[in-house]
Image (cartoon, helix red, strand yellow):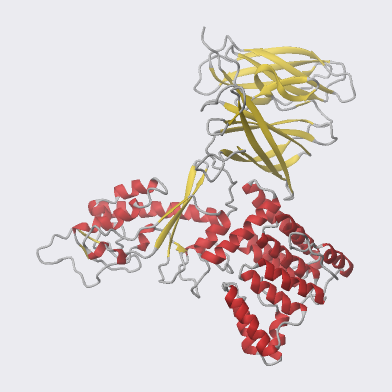
Amino acid sequence: MTITTHKSGLFRSGSIVAIAALLGAVVRPEPVQAQTMPAQVYFDLVNRGYEKLANRISKKLELRSDPNDEDVQSLLERWVREEGGPDDGWDYIAVTRLWLRAGQAAQAETALLEAEASGDVPPPILLLDQARVAFLSGQAELAAEAYWKGCEGAGETAYKEYWLDIEVLATPQEMDEWDRFRRLPITDTDLCRFLRRFWNERALASAMEVGQRMSVHYARTRYALDHYSRRGGKKGPTFSNRLGRPTNAQYDDRGLLYVRMGAPDRQTSFAGNPSVGQQAVSAECYQPNESWAYDYPGETRVYHLSTLTGTDDYWLIENLGLVYRCGDPSASLSGVAGARVTGVLSPVNENRAVQLGPAAALVLQDLYRSRQGVDPRYAQVAQQMSNDLGQGVLNPSTTMSTGSEALDAQRLLAQERGWTQEDGEFAVDSVPDRPPVAADSRLLVEELQFQSPREGMNRVWVNAVIEADRLTPVNLPGGQFRYQVEGRWVIVDELGESTTHNSSFRASTPRVLGRDESLPVRMAADLPPGRYRYALLLRDAHTSPGKELRSGNYRRVDLTVRELGAGAPALSDVAVAADSGGAWSPGGGVRLRPSPAHLTGTDGVAYVYFEVYNLTPGGQYTTRIRLQPAEGEEGEAFDLSFPGDGATDASRMSRRMLRVDLSDSEPGRYTMQVSVTDEATGASTLPYYTPITVNRTER
């Protein structure tokens, strides 16, 4: 069996895949941990009297190990010196993983070629390690190809390898699902299907293609291994454990956040207030600490981390104030002679009161104020932590901190714990991915469903407008400006299967567009009836100077595709436009510019398009439109009727575009109800409700 060399330096998987297909059920070695020492290698060395060498290699391949180039090279030289060096396929798998741990793709590839040439290693193991090497080298397409080929014939060993590569991303529910899955006979399981559902969830949340999201994961794990590897043995604090933190994660909680959520948008730390000459507020009183902030539409997620235990590992904490660790246990309320004592404070991990001087309010006030840059809520907390209240916040002794101030202090901490609990659950107990976009442009989206020419399908349109003010125009000759928006639409069905649609949209304008002006974006997909979830990402094709992420925004939506086929009369969705004509066409020669804002023109006129199905061929039908003022709006309800003729072809489908004149209505928001009655049978469609805003300019 031969692996051919690709021009990029990485090998193709064709020959391995062919052998995997011929082998069918592969021989399953003993289970091993992901990217750790193969059991065959360990026991072979031990049985031949090289237990120390076996343990040394195993140590370098432990989940929490982070060897560098020199470590690996020295270990390989010792292997050669003591035992003659690697000489079979599994030996070279161990060498491959050592170099992967050191971040050296070229050396890992060389060792993997030796492993493949030996014929000792099942193809799924080779393919997964091939995928790891390719991801490390940035060859995402080749990596994804090997990854999915490998899972097709995977045995028990490969199952565990695949899982431990992704466990750090798993939610507690997914970990339970995997635990049930792995206990089933392999003949009753489908690893590829499990993995596709897993990755499709992350692709949906991040509005990425699956291969792209996988590549991001392996890049993040490499960075986290280099920067956030666990140094200590046992994990001390339990907050993230209670949230459901993966037990095998090789990173501290900074690494956990980084792998699951990426780099924070903002981060800060606090090392005490050197301007205050008092021991109680000196830098030594604060454990090393960091706060990371992630921006999502309409909210910010904040995570406080500290070493607490004194090691280099950072763990999530429930209250920022926990990083303050000073206090004199021998102090009493009488205080220093002649000094005015204004309050007491306890170290957070001890139930005892500690006497502090007049500067004690600065202990927490400055600490919390240091976080106002990551989230404005912490400026408000700092403001409340003033004077006696600030000194009583962390005092659990009711004899020392009493009355309304102590109660307010505890409420303040409880409020903060509520924030950190919610944000912690979001990070650990959900899929917290977000698309790579600045999310700084207003975005309005609706779906429009019509019957597709493809049998049993609906044509579903996403009809969107995105604010143009933050997009970057390109100057064109003649004083024109061109805008370009990239769109990605990721759709996941009820079975967890994913499809991705990519497109690009351009518009030329005679001037630069402002804040209240927008660009239309429309994309279509044919889908069978059922329930779906989708993510729509729209972003500028150009990056603005000084910005890491492109301007744009995204939406995540639950979608039900309706049944519009044979049966009773059925109504499509209703498109609303401010004027006739335009670039969008649902078919039948109809063209208009539907807007999800559902505004009439300034003359109070709207153009309404819909389709009706299952009418009597060639028969008469009547469209009824009823307008009802939205709650709190002025205006009167009224009804309109429009007669029409049904289609005479076999499709039994009729298109209708109506000019609805609302110029006599009061400006404001209304609910429009549309229904159609087949005059031949008396059957009516279910009413369709949609909002509409009368945007009439007063004369």
User: In the image as oriented, which residue stretches furthest toward the bottom?
Assistant: 49
Q: Position of residue 495 (x, y in %)?
A: 74, 50
Front residue (pair 348, 214):
214
Q: Residue at x 62, y 84 (%)?
A: 55
Quadrant position of the N terminus in the picture? bottom right
Q: In the figure, is residue 658 to the left or right of 72?
A: right
Q: Residue at x 67, y 61 (%)?
A: 137
Vertical order, 443 against 630 (above or below): below
Q: Residue at x 81, y 36 (%)?
A: 457
For residue 355, which quarter of the picture?
A: bottom left
User: In the image as oriented, which residue stretches furthest toward the front?
Assistant: 477
Q: Position of residue 46 (x, y in %)?
A: 68, 89
Q: Looking at the image, can residue 245 be seen?
A: no
Q: Residue at x 64, y 83 (%)?
A: 77
Vertical order, 191 against 446 (above or below): below
Q: In the figure, is residue 659 to the left or right of 597?
A: right
Vertical order, 622 against 545 (above or below): above
Q: Position of residue 136 (x, y in %)?
A: 66, 62
Front residue (pair 31, 349):
31
Front residue (pair 275, 305):
275
Count of marks placed on residues:
0
User: In the image as oriented, which residue stretches furthest toward the top?
Assistant: 699
Q: Looking at the image, can residue 599 be seen?
A: yes
